[in-house]
Image (spheres, grey):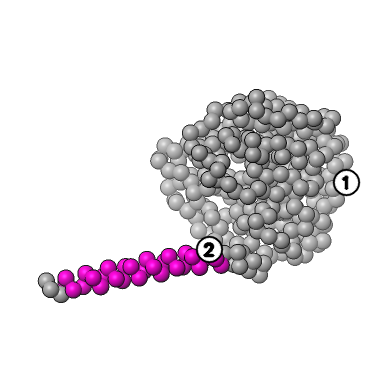
Amino acid sequence: MALKEGLRPRKRTVWRLILLALGLLGLLLLNWLPILRHLEVFIPMGVCPSATMLLMKDNFTGVLRPWARPEVPTCTSWGAPIIWDGTFDPDIAQQEARRQNLTIGLTVFAVGRYLEKYLARFLESAEEHFMVGQRVVYYVFTERPAAVPRLALGPGRQLRVQYVVRERRWQDVSMARMRTLHEALGGRLGREADFVFCMDVDQHFSSAFGPEALAESVAQLHAWHYRWPRWLLPFERDSRSAAAVAQGEGDFYYHAALFGGSVAALRGLTAHCARAQQQDRERGLEALWHDESHLNKYFWLHKPAKVLSPEFCWSPEIGPRPEIRRPRLLSAPKEYAILRD
C-alpha cells in the first residue's frame, strides 16, 4: 500500500512533464509553421509524360502547350489537362466560346456578415476579369436580397438574386450549398446557362479568368495542399462517412471555393454531395471539411475533365511561389471570429 502511495506523485509528475512537452511542441509548430510552409517548394510535384503531352487537346483552347511549363504537372493520370499559365492560348479560347454562343453562370453565396464584407468586391472584380466578352449571369444566394449591391454591368451580363434561408450554424450554411445549387440548376439557372462556376465570396479576381477554364467538369487544385504527398492530404478518413476516402485512394485534394462544369455535370455532382451529406446527417456524422470533403469524394469517383492549377485560386498568405505566375483569384484573409456567429 505504501508503495502504491509513493508511485502516485511520480505518475502525476510524469503526466505533467508529458503535457508540458506537448505544449512546447505546439508552440514550436506555431512558430516554425511559416518556415515549414516555405520548405514545401522542395517536395517534387511530378511531370506529365512526354507521350501524353503530344496528344493533349482541349475543347476550348485547341492544342495545349504543356511543354511550356516543364516544372509542374500539366496532366492527370487519366489524361485530363491541368491548366497553368502559359499552357493555352487565351485568344483561341475566347473565339471558341463565342462561336458556341455560350452563357456562363457564376454562383456565389453571401450569407450573414459575408455579404457586407466581401460581395461588392467579388462582383466588381468579376466584372473586370471574369469571362470578359462573354455572356454571363451572376447568381447571388442570400437571406437579404435587398442588401445586394447593384452594379453597372457590361453588355450581355446579368445579375440574379435568389433568397435562401439562413442556417443556424455556419457549417450548415456551407453544407446546404449543394442542395440549393442542385435546385437552382434544375430551375432558371439551368435554363439560362450552358456552363456554371460555383465560387466562395471571400475572394476577388485579380487577372483574366476566361473560357480556358471551361469543361464538362472542372476541379481546382487546393493552393494549400497541391504539393503534399497523397498520404498527407486532408481527405475524410472516417470510414462511416459517405465522404470517406481510404488511405491510398484519392488523386489530388480539390478546393470547394472553385468548381464548375456543364449544367448536367453539376446537377450530378450536387445531387451526389447533397445525398451523401444527408446520409451522414442521418448517421449523426459530419465530414471533417463539410461540403469540401464530399466534393473530393465525388471527384475521386468521377474524375474531372479539367483541373485548374492553384493559380486560378491562390492564397496570398502562402507567399510567393515560382510556379504561381499569374493568380486569377485571390482569397481574403480568414476572419472567422468576426464573420461566423
Q: Which residues are magenta?
A: 4-32
At 67% from the left and 29% from the top, the residue drawn is 148
State the quadrant of the N terminus. Answer: bottom left
Image spot of residue 241 (x, y percent) = 46, 46
Q: CA distance from mark 2 to mark 1?
A: 45 Å
Please determine whether, in this image, residue 43 is positioned above or below residue 65: below
Q: Looking at the rendering, which quadrant does residue 137 occupy? A: top right
The residue under label 1 is 91
Q: Position of residue 152 (x, y in %)?
A: 80, 30
Disc 2 packing (10 Å; few <14; some 14–19; many ≥20): few
Amino acid marked by disc 2: Leu
- Residue 327 is at least partly visible in this image: yes
Reply yes or no: does residue 52 show up in magenta.
Answer: no
Secondary structure beneath disc 1? helix
Vertical position of residue 38 compared to residue 271: above or below: below
Taking the image as shown, residue 108 lies to the left or right of residue 279, namely right
* SS majority, magenta: helix
Residue 191 picture location, percent across and down: 71, 26
Residue at figure coordinates x 87%, y 41% from the top left = 95
Q: Residue sitting at 56 percent across and 58 percent down?
A: 233
x%, y% of residue 149? 70, 30
The three-letter amino acid code for the residue at tag 1 is Asp
Residue at mark 2? 30
| Residue furthest front as drawn | 338
In the image, taking residue 37 as reference, residue 47 lies left or right, namely right
User: Of discs 2 and 1, which sits in the foreground?
Assistant: 2
Q: Is residue 43 above or below residue 265?
A: below
Residue 12 is covered by the magenta coloring: yes
Q: Nearer the viewer, residue 25 or 56?
A: 25
